[in-house]
Image (tube, rainbow, N blue to C red):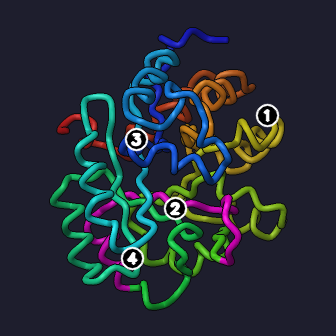
Amino acid sequence: MEQTEKWNIIDLHTHIYPTVLARRALEVVGRENDAADQIPVKENLWRFMKEEGIALSVVQPVVSKPSTQTDVNRFAREIVRPNVLAFGGLHPDCEHVQEEIEKLKDMNMAGIKFHPPFQQVYLTDDKYTEMWKKINHLGFPVLIHCGKAKVKQPFDLYPSGVRTFLKYLSDIPVILAHMGGRSEDPEEEKILMEFPENVYVDTAMSAERGTPEEFERLTSLLGPERVIFGSDFPYGTQKAAAALIKNSSFSDNEKAMMLGGTAAKILGDKIRTR
């Protein structure tokens, strides 16, 4: 394996929480009794980053209810530092959604995160059209959870659903988490491969739930320049996620793009001005 120093690694998909909520966040995967040095708080993320040579992590907050939006984003803004950025969380059904998007811009958030199953929303609904247009106008990168989640509900989103609103997001990076949802439906994969070049996928949970062969197949089809390193910490590990890319058969330049180069282009001056 190549030496860590060879790569400028950016983890675009991590989660941390206030200490009082960190164990509750692990209940969904049955890990609420994890040791204190494993729970998703900022100190543990920083330690894992140092151990794995991660230059920058991006925290992706989830606003599960409109009533929590202000507190969630306040915490996200407070944890920003030289090696940590944060997207803002946005609940599509919050009051005055246009103003809330403006607030995220004023807070200098690096992008906007959506999680349809946890938020219990159908992002394909036409009522969100003006929301998408506003996000596109302000130039926010968007990261959207795709595929299943550890909850039983009908809000899972796949490429066929993304296609219904992608036309409103033509000017911004759109990152589909979990390799676009890793659907077993060949039609969903076909739709993903036909998306325009502003659509990317991240590798969150690919090391834990997929195989290296499947990762390489999907990456070859989509193009390494559109695949972004993401660990989904604490649900996945930065070590396994980085190793999936480092140990692959792609060239050094292609690995560099996946591990940090493409993410750096998407984040742009957020890296330099925070």
Real-space Cα distance between discs 1 and 3? 24 Å
Real-space Cα distance between discs 2 and 3? 14 Å
Could you say whether the residue bearing mark 1 is in a helix, strand or loop?
A: helix
Q: Looking at the rendered structure, which numbered label has been put on residue 58? A: 3
Count residues near mark 4 (Cα–Cα under 10 Å), then give few for <14, some for 14-19, many for 20+. some
Q: Looking at the rendered structure, which numbered label has been put on residue 212? A: 1
Percent x, y of residue 205:
66, 43
Q: Which residue is found at the position 55% from the left and 76% from the top? A: 120
Locate residue 67: give its quadrant: bottom left
Percent x, y of residue 139:
30, 62
Q: Looking at the rendered structure, which numbered label has been put on residue 132? A: 4
Is-magenta flag for residue 264?
no
Q: Amino acid at mark 1?
A: Pro
Q: Are marks 4 and 3 in contact (CB under 8 Å)?
A: no
Q: Looking at the rendered structure, which numbered label has been put on residue 112? A: none
The magenta segment: 130-154
Real-space Cα distance between discs 2 and 1? 23 Å
Task: Read off the residue under disc 2.
Answer: 144
Real-space Cα distance between discs 2 and 4? 12 Å
Image check: 214 left or right of 233?
right
Q: Amino acid at mark 2?
A: Ile
Q: Amino acid at mark 4?
A: Trp
